[in-house]
Image (cartoon, helix red, strand yellow):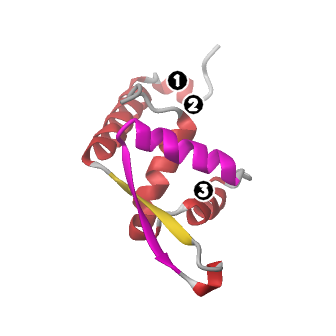
C-alpha cells in the first residue's frame, strides 16, 4: 500500500464517492465534483485519483453489468473502505482543529 496522506483533490474525490454511494463511477464522480466545486475537471484526472486512492486502500472497486447504452462496456464502481472513511474523518478533524485555532481577529480581516 502506498502513502496514506490525502491531497486536496483526492479528498474531494473520496468525499464525492461517499456522496454518490452505489452510483460512484468515473463520469458520475466528474459531474458531481464539477457541480459542487464550480470548476472544470478532466475525466482522466478523476480516474488517476480513483486508482491512487484504491492503491492506498481508501477505495475498493467492482465492475457493473454490461449495458446496451454503453455498447456492452461495463462501468467500474467505487466504494469507500473503512480505511477511506477513517482518512476522511482524520482530514475533517484536522481542518476543524485548524479553523477553530485561527484567532477571531484574523477571521474578521484584522490580520497583518
User: Residues under labels 1 and 2: Cα distance?
Assistant: 5 Å
* Residue depth check, mark 2 versus mark 3: number of the one nearer the observer: 3
Q: Residues within 10 Å of mark 3 (few under 14, many from 20)?
A: many
Looking at the rendered structure, the secondary structure element under dot 3 is helix
Q: Residues within 10 Å of mark 2 (few under 14, many from 20)?
A: few
According to the image, label 1 marks what residue? 105
- Which part of the image, by quadrant, shows the C terminus? top right
State the residue at coordinates (42%, 28%).
5
| Above or below: residue 29 compared with residue 71 | above
**Residue 78 figure quarter:** bottom left
| Above or below: residue 34 compared with residue 82 | below
Q: Which residues are magenta?
A: 43-66
According to the image, label 3 marks what residue? 33
| Magenta-span inclusion, residue 6 | no
**Residue 3 figure quarter:** top left
Looking at the rendered structure, the secondary structure element under dot 1 is helix
Q: Does residue 95 appear in this view?
A: yes
Of labels 2 and 3, earlier in sequence is 3
Image coords of residue 7 (percent x, y): 52, 32
Q: Looking at the image, which is closer to me, 63 or 22?
A: 63
Amino acid at each position: 500500500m502506498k502513502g496514506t496522506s490525502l491531497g486536496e483533490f483526492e479528498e474531494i474525490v473520496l468525499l464525492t464517492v461517499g456522496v454518490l454511494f452505489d452510483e460512484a463511477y468515473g463520469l458520475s464522480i466528474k459531474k458531481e465534483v464539477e457541480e459542487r466545486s464550480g470548476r472544470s475537471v478532466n475525466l482522466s484526472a478523476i480516474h488517476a485519483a480513483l486508482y491512487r486512492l484504491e492503491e492506498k486502500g481508501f477505495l475498493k472497486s467492482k465492475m457493473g453489468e454490461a449495458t446496451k447504452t454503453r455498447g456492452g462496456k461495463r462501468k467500474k464502481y467505487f466504494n469507500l473502505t473503512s480505511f477511506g472513511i477513517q482518512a476522511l474523518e482524520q482530514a475533517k478533524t484536522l481542518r476543524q482543529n485548524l479553523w477553530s485555532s485561527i484567532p477571531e481577529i484574523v477571521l474578521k480581516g484584522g490580520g497583518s
